Image (spheres, rainbow, N blue to C red):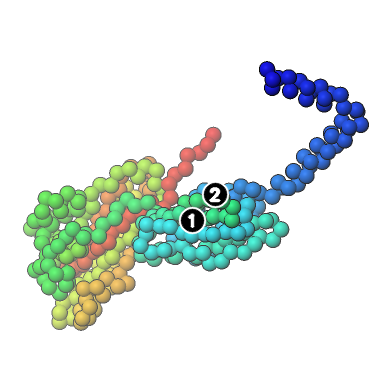
Amino acid sequence: MKSNILITKTWRSWCGLPYQVWGVLLVSTFISCEKSKEDTGRVTEMIVSEDAEQAHIISAHEFTVEGGKDTLYVFGDQTLDVNFETSDPNTWVKVDKMEPVGGKGGVRLILEVSPMQTQFKKRTGVLNIKGAEAYSGKFIRLSQGYDTRIAEEFAWLRYGNGNPLDEGRGTLIGQWTNAQKEYGWTNPGTAATSKTYGMNGFVQLGSADFGGTLLSAVVPGIEKDSLLLLTFNAVAYTARNGEQDGNKLTIKLKGAEFADGQTSKMVELKYYDHQSALILTKMWEETQAIFALKKPVRNPTASTIQLEFIAGDGQEMAKNRLFVDNINLYTTAQFQAIKK
């Protein structure tokens, strides 16, 4: 009750003021409000944008696989502490420099992004941007690369010592352990005339007398994928005396086609240096093949894909021994639903 009486008295005392005083109060209040608007004209909450006009405010940002310099704009605080955190073994994003955005009260944040040269599996991290004021800051999710459909390094194969010159050390695919067969790689050819071997961390296609084929499992769930990227390493056989086999490899696709619309492509491979003392590692240098794939024109909604690698030109060929490793298939673009 006492508080109510005080409120009533206060209200009456205000009501009893002369008109001139009310006018002063109203003008003062108006000026105070206008001043408040002027003071708050600058951004107080931190904003991160892809452009200086703040037309594309972001909480996440994706870099191209080519890397290089990329720019973000930060508004709300010009005193910034920026660091990048990632679970990747390499720090693939670094702050190149920060500079003020003239007349806009912001900071241009220039980042240096490492390129992806042989592996394109998506990697992620967080850019932590802190301001001078306590509890001010933004966390921006960063990513680079593509989602993976196939990622096969054959690390689970442990036959022989990994030297391609040591023939007879591999194990035919039909004799792999049940655990190894569960990875889904097969040879669709006849066992008596088609030879595919497991080596130490890679696969050998063919022998001196027969060809060989490696077929992947059927990969489901690609209904929305429109563009894909196939990469692998492959190298042709050279004997200890320097004699070379054929070097032709045919790749066939089921559920996709190459950029030229074909479902089969033959490539000629390089030969490793059979005299190198570091042949176990040097044999794979400059052997990566990269192909852009797309959905079949006649079946753009295909939901599965399968890869086939054949030692030979279109069909298996004897004395055309090849070694294959690091088979990867990435999704680079997906169909987008059209908003009506």
For the residue pair 191 and 95, the one nearer the viewer reads as: 95
Q: Please state which of the two labelled residues, at mark 1 or mark 2, is closer to the viewer.
A: 2
On the image, the x and y values in percent for residue 102 come to 69, 61
Q: Amino acid at mark 2?
A: Tyr
On screen, residue 283 above or below 292: below
Number of callouts: 2
For the residue pair 20 and 39, the one nearer the viewer reads as: 20
In this picture, residue 1 sits left or right of residue 185: right
Give the residue number, with chain letter if any, for mark 2: 135
Tell me the number on the disc at residue 101: none
SS at circle 1? strand
Q: Quadrant of residue 32?
A: top right
Quadrant of the snapshot with the N terminus: top right
Q: Amino acid at mark 1?
A: Leu
In this picture, residue 285 sits left or right of residue 1: left
Q: Who's the residue at 67% across and 56% down the image?
A: 105
On the image, the x and y values in percent for residue 208 come to 12, 69
Q: Who's the residue at 91% across and 28% down the image?
A: 19
Q: Residues within 10 Å of mark 2 (few under 14, many from 20)?
A: few
N-term mark: 1 or 2: 1
On the image, the x and y values in percent for residue 163 come to 16, 72
Give the residue number, with chain letter if any, for mark 1: 127
On screen, residue 269 above or below 53: below
Q: Who's the residue at 33% across and 65% down the image?
A: 289
Quadrant of the snapshot with the C terminus: top right
For the residue pair 138 and 315, the one nearer the viewer reads as: 138
